[in-house]
């Protein structure tokens, strides 16, 4: 597995940054190569994207979500990936958004791209486009529900 860690400071209150990030179906507006994200239910997403020029589809599960703090996920099929986005209040009008993404590059093109830092630049670009979006438009909605970690769920 390869890991990418990137962050960006956005000039909006923490709740605004968090609320916009929970609008998963809007990810194609700022994430390069993402064609669509369909929210199946509160914890499941279906992704369609172009990765190293190849059409890819996969399903992901939100494994933990705490309003204004974090959203963690992992794939349940298809493209192997997992990660967490955390939100940090800098001051009343500034928030740091941090992304940690773990993924497994497949095939020669993805491995070559990984070797020259293409995924790192893509994630940083996505964060910069998110910054532009949320600073210019605010949040278009938000889901304030909580998803406890698997070890915190009743019956676990």
Image (tube, grey):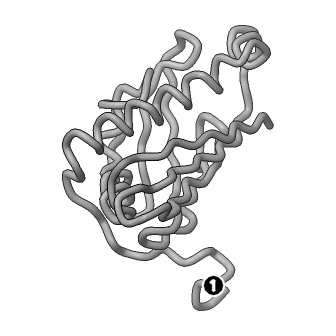
Q: Is residue 123 above or below residue 141?
A: above
Residue 86 sits in which quadrant?
bottom right
At horizontal 72% and vertical 22% (from top left) the residue drawn is 106
Q: What residue is shown at x 62% (from left), y 90% (from top)? A: 155
- Quadrant of the image for the C terminus? bottom right
**Where residue 127 sits in the image (x, y, percent)?**
47, 36
Q: Quadrant of residue 22?
A: bottom left
Q: Which residue is disc 1 drawn over?
A: 152
- The image position of residue 107, as x and y in percent, is 73, 15
Residue 67 sits in which quadrant? bottom left
Provide residue 97's location: percent of width, then percent of height.
51, 51
* Residue shown at 50% from the left, 68% from the top: 69
Which residue is more in the foreground, 44 or 13?
A: 13
Kindly give the residue lying farthest to the bottom in the view shown: 154
Residue pictured at 38% horizontal, 30% vertical: 129
Place of residue 85 in the rendered image (x, y in percent of width and height, measured from the top left):
55, 53
Q: Secondary structure at mark 1?
A: helix
Left or right of 65, for residue 130: left
Q: Nearer the viewer, residue 140 or 43?
A: 140
């Amino acid at each position: 597995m390869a890991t990418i860690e990137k962050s960006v400071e956005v000039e909006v209150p923490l709740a605004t940054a968090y609320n916009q990030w929970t609008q998963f179906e809007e990810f194609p507006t700022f994430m390069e190569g993402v064609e669509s994200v369909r929210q199946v239910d509160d914890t499941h997403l279906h992704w369609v994207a172009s990765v190293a020029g190849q059409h890819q589809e996969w399903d992901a599960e939100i494994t933990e979500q705490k309003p204004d703090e974090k959203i963690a996920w992992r794939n349940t099929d298809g493209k192997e990936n997992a990660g967490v986005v955390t939100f940090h209040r800098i001051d009343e009008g500034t928030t740091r958004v941090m992304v940690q993404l773990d993924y497994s590059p497949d095939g020669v093109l993805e491995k070559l791209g990984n070797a020259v830092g293409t995924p790192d630049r893509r994630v940083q670009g996505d964060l910069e486009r998110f910054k532009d979006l949320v600073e210019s438009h605010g949040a278009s909605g938000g889901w304030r529900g909580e998803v406890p970690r698997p070890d915190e769920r009743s019956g676990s």
